[in-house]
Amino acid sequence: MEAKIIDFHTHTFPAFLAGRAIAKLAGNARALNYLNGTAEELRESMRKAGVDYSLLLPVVTRPDQQEEINRIAGEVNARTRESGIISFGGIHPDNEDYRGILRRIAEAGIRGIKLHPVFQKVYMDDVRYLRIVECAWENGLIVLTHAGYDIGYPGLAYSSVSHIASALDVLERSCAGRMGDFVLAHMGGWDSWKEVEERIVGREVFLDTSFSLLPIQPAPGMVRSPEENPPLSREAFLRMVRGHGADRILFGTDSPWSGQEEYILAIKESGLTAGEQAAILGGNAAKLLNL
């Protein structure tokens, strides 16, 4: 049986909102969107690229959004068999009933949650996040967080490698022997990969490949120099994969901000062995998501 390809990091928006949301985010980042942000275009991209499953990562930017976002995640997951799309849930660090929210997410069969310290304006090592991560693990949930800087909000250090490393220090002490699954997006720290090699590689986390391996294409009418936010080099990528272990790397694109076909090709041309490619492109994710 041919191995499945699973994109562990994608985003869509409701059709009525997608145009405005994509325009705003593309403008902030000065980065091209490959898709229009709708589920329909994501499914077409999956078909063309040969992607079997895509994981949606919604972000709760206000505490009052979590109920609706998690309701929609449940509806998405009810249609996974025909769509190939899976959704995580979300929670805001200011949701005081975090224990109840996380319990209900798990009871709904949602496999994990997405955190975004930059959008949520809370440092990754803040106690509000640490207690959410611990409680999520107690409920058997995967935790995935944005890691590193954010292209649309330059200089904001809420999820910098230093704050992530600090959070890991605390969690490794408080959850010794019982840490759950923790995924750091963007190869552990977007635009900070040298620091990731020094402080994150080899620790008990997964890294996803999203928005790290390809040059950023400018949005129409905007300019980006090749020296601005360069991608992770092939040599550094191979070094990080082998230093961290290919069994803890997850294929992710950050679609619509990268193309799925282009990203699969980048993985296949990176110099990884066939076994490493199979694990990264889907094998590891299939185990995490019980697919």
Image (cartoon, rainbow, N blue to C red):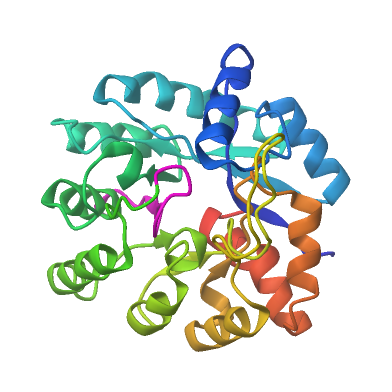
* Side (left or right) of 116 relative to 12: left
Identify the residue at image location x=19%, y=58%. Answer: 125
Identify the residue at image location x=42%, y=61%. Answer: 184
User: Which residue is the extreme one toward the top?
Assistant: 16
Where's residue 264, x and y in %?
Answer: 77, 61
State whether residue 92 is above or below residue 225: above
**Quick one: 283 or 163, which is closer to the camera?**
163
Q: Quadrant of residue 174?
A: bottom left
Q: How many numbered discs? A: 0
**Quick one: 35 or 66, which is closer to the camera?**
35
* Side (left or right) of 110 relative to 87: left
State whether residue 166 is above or below residue 140: below
Q: Is residue 49 magenta?
A: no
Q: Quadrant of the N terminus?
A: bottom right
User: Which residue is the extreme one toward the right?
Assistant: 48
**Quick one: 96 or 160, which is closer to the camera?**
160
Identify the residue at image location x=81%, y=64%. Answer: 265
Where's residue 140, x and y in %?
Answer: 34, 52
Where's residue 254, x and y in %?
Answer: 59, 48
Q: Main secondary structure of the magenta part?
A: loop
State whether residue 113 is above or below residue 200: above
Residue 228 visible in this rendered orientation of the protein: yes
Q: Which residues are magenta?
A: 138-153
Q: Quadrant of residue 172?
A: bottom left
Identify the residue at image location x=18%, y=38%. Answer: 99
